[in-house]
Image (cartoon, helix red, strand yellow):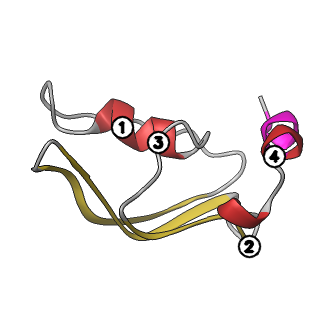
């Protein structure tokens, strides 16, 4: 089964600081997840990736098996399950 979201080796650097360093994860539909960590560890940045509010410097993000950057933004955002 194809994951709802899949991120592979995603890195984000802001102001010469590594925010996310080669993060990989699969998010399956119907499962609850918790993102925990200290302040400034990249939790919000990670969530922003899933709605294309942040763009990774490296790595890939897939939504239902398709590269997130190949999907029309409005169509993608409307298709996200609540």
Secondary structure under the numbered disc 1 in the rendered image: helix
The residue that mark 4 highlights is 76
| Mark 2 or mark 4, whichever is nearer to me | 4
Q: Earlier in the sequence, mark 1 or mark 3?
A: 1
The residue that mark 3 highlights is 54
Label disc, if present, on residue 36 of the rendered structure:
none
Image point (78%, 44%), residue name: 73
Give the magenta-colored segment's residue range. Answer: 76-81
Q: Position of residue 10 (x, y in %)?
A: 37, 65
Does the residue at mark 1 contact the one at mark 3 (Cβ under 8 Å)? yes
Q: Position of residue 64 (x, y in %)?
A: 76, 64
Question: Label 4 crowding class (10 Å Cα cut-off): few <14, some 14-19, many 20+?
Answer: some
| Mark 2 or mark 3, whichever is nearer to me | 3
Residue 66 sits in which quadrant?
bottom right
Does the residue at mark 1 contact the one at mark 4 (Cβ under 8 Å)? no
| 70 in the magenta segment | no
Task: Name, please, the residue furthest toward the front.
Answer: 15
Q: Earlier in the sequence, mark 2 or mark 3?
A: 3
**Distance CA(mark 4)–CA(mark 3):** 15 Å
Does the residue at mark 2 contact the one at mark 3 (Cβ under 8 Å)? no
Secondary structure under the numbered disc 2 in the rendered image: loop
The residue that mark 1 highlights is 45
| 79 in the magenta segment | yes
**Distance CA(mark 1)–CA(mark 4):** 19 Å
Provide the major secondary structure of the magenta segment: helix
The residue that mark 2 highlights is 65
Question: Label 2 crowding class (10 Å Cα cut-off): few <14, some 14-19, many 20+?
Answer: few
Does the residue at mark 4 contact the one at mark 3 (Cβ under 8 Å)? no
């Amino acid at each position: 089964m194809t994951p709802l979201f899949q991120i592979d080796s995603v890195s984000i650097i802001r102001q010469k600081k590594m925010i996310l360093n080669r993060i990989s994860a699969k998010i399956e539909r119907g499962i609850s997840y918790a993102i925990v960590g200290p302040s400034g560890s990249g939790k919000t940045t990670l969530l922003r990736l899933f709605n294309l509010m942040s763009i990774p410097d490296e790595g890939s993000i897939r939504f239902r098996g398709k590269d997130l950057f190949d999907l029309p933004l409005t169509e993608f955002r409307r298709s996200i399950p609540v």
